[in-house]
Image: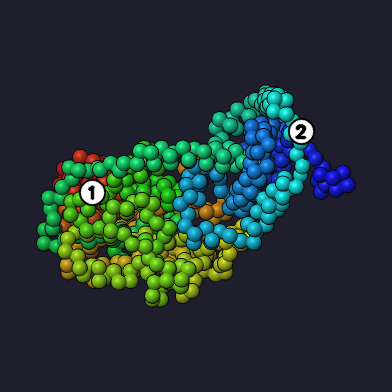
Amino acid sequence: MSEGKRRLFPQVSSARLVLMFSLALVLFYNFATWRALNSLVPMEGLWGVAFFASFGFFLWAAFTLLLTLVSFRPLLKPALTLVALVSAAAAYFMNSYGVVIDTVMVQNVVETNPGEAAALFSARMFGYLLVLGVLPAAIIWLTPVRYSPFFRGLLNKVLVIFGCLVVVAVCVGAFYSTYAPVFRQEEKLTHFINPTNYIYAVSKFTKQRLGIKENLVVQPIGEDAVMPRKVSADGRKSLMIFVVGETARADHFSLNGYARDTNPELKKLDILNFTNVSSCGTSTAVSVPCMFSKFPREDYSDKKGKTNQGLLDILQRVGVSVLWLDNNSDCKGTCLRVPNRDIPKDQPGPFCDGKNCLDEALLQNLQAYIDGLKDNAIIVLHADGSHGPEYYERYPKSLERFTPVCRTNQLGSCSSEELVNVYDNTILYTDFFLSRVVELLKQNQERFDTSMVYVSDHGESLGENGVYLHAAPYAIAPKAQTHVPMVMWFGSGALGGMGVDRGCLEKKADGAELSHDNLFHSVLGLYGVHTSLYQPDLDIFHSCKRDMTAAQ
């Protein structure tokens, strides 16, 4: 470069660039971290200010140490650019929706379809990416960097790392009694620290996925399964429609005591409403495969879900006709070995507009399929339900009963009233949709013993304590994300044909502690499937069978 040519930014050493960028991460990318820390250790008095200052130096040293490891000539600028861009996106979602970054969140990102991703884009997100991503990246590339000869540079890096370790030790040592419980017990905080949260989560998720891909052999389960009773006592076969709900909160169902009448249709029907049901996870990617697997929540993992067959495989093996219809992201691997179909967004009819489909699209032409059934059958409808953040697109205008509503994906910009209104309208539509499912089943009672099972995959946060959407780590997730509605309907004679005492079942529905763990065994029990995997104590209906109640 000629002496007369002026530089836009002065030349700096690689160590100084790392120090400045690390400081920027602490100051501008970690607002969520500071909020979370303040909720754990309020910044009150001189001691509180001193602790917060020490935490800032702790983060600065930790980030500097981490980035020093990549501060070599070919790596430094690309690495800092990548960190700036990804950290900008992470900061946006943590600040706007109160989400935390862990392996489940990374899984959600990887498995999100283009339509779901597009729903999250906004001018605010673009602003974050521009100011915290593109602008810092441009400054990094326009700043000339001075690199030391290799061995001298290596020595400098060792000294910087040693200095960072000293700073970390001093900060932690000075406030050990506070740091220790914060990092040992408050898992929540580490999920907010940007960029180490997503670096750790991505590395852990990648390791898990590589392990799955290297050993992806789907193990058959329930190979001893048989269904001795192919028809009920009255000679009819069974038809169940299993509705997998999306993002529905149990505490927003009027059936569960919610003040608003969000279930006007279901309350007219002779349904069983289970009031105390917990989800397996806080995201679709976890809960959907988990609820159809043989594993209880405590023993479930993504690897186990992908490398073992599930409930639908067993039912298909014993002769039950299985169909999965999807109006959501997809079945998360649950339906890969059974007949399945996604509802196209441009499906002709009144329910699809090319971008989204209302859940009633799942029922179009379904009667024709039922007419062709000759065996026992289960039809799984994966509904779009209350999928956020664009709740206003999940229901028809005719069911917008609660107003005013939030009509943006920037949930934090809406009032609490608007957000609750728009969400409650989605529940109102779910209620209407389920009544349509029951209506369809009633039309087929002459041929089948009919039943409907509805359960949501997880709940949703609506801004309580600054948290929106879902996918919080289960250990710290609010009840709003794990307490889910479950409703069942049985056609005339269906329960009697299975020898189930309805009165007993009604008592169990009113408060018995249940979860997604019960679904696998309960459905096997309803179809009378015998297998060594079946656990009667997890079957909701088993203790209410007449021979059991008589014994009691």
Dot 1 crowding, Cα within 10 Å, few <14, some 14–19, many 20+? many
The image quadrant that residue 163 belongs to is top right
SS at badge 1: helix
Q: Can residue 343 be seen in this snapshot?
A: yes
Is 442 on the left or on the right of 147, as rendered?
left
Rendered residue at 65%/54% (across/down): 129
Residue corresponding to mark 2 = 46
Q: Amino acid at mark 2?
A: Leu
Is 32 on the left or on the right of 309, as rendered?
right
Q: Amino acid at mark 1?
A: Ile
Q: Position of residue 74 (x, y in %)?
A: 65, 38
Rendered residue at 22%/58% (across/down): 321
Q: Position of residue 402 (x, y in %)?
A: 51, 69
Q: CA distance from mark 2 to mark 1?
A: 64 Å
Q: Quadrant of the N terminus?
A: top right
Q: Can residue 259 be seen in this snapshot?
A: no
Which residue is nearer to you in this view: 376 or 248?
376
Q: Position of residue 359 (x, y in %)?
A: 39, 66
SS at badge 2: helix
The image quadrant that residue 377 belongs to is bottom left
Rendered residue at 37%/62% (across/down): 342
Which residue is nearer to you in this view: 550 or 132?
132
Above-or-below relation of 45 to 350: above
Residue corresponding to mark 1 = 314
Is 302 on the left or on the right of 136, as rendered?
left
Which residue is nearer to you in this view: 298 or 211?
211
Rendered residue at 49%/59% (across/down): 114
Q: Earlier in the sequence, mark 2 or mark 1?
A: 2
Which residue is nearer to you in this view: 376 or 336?
336
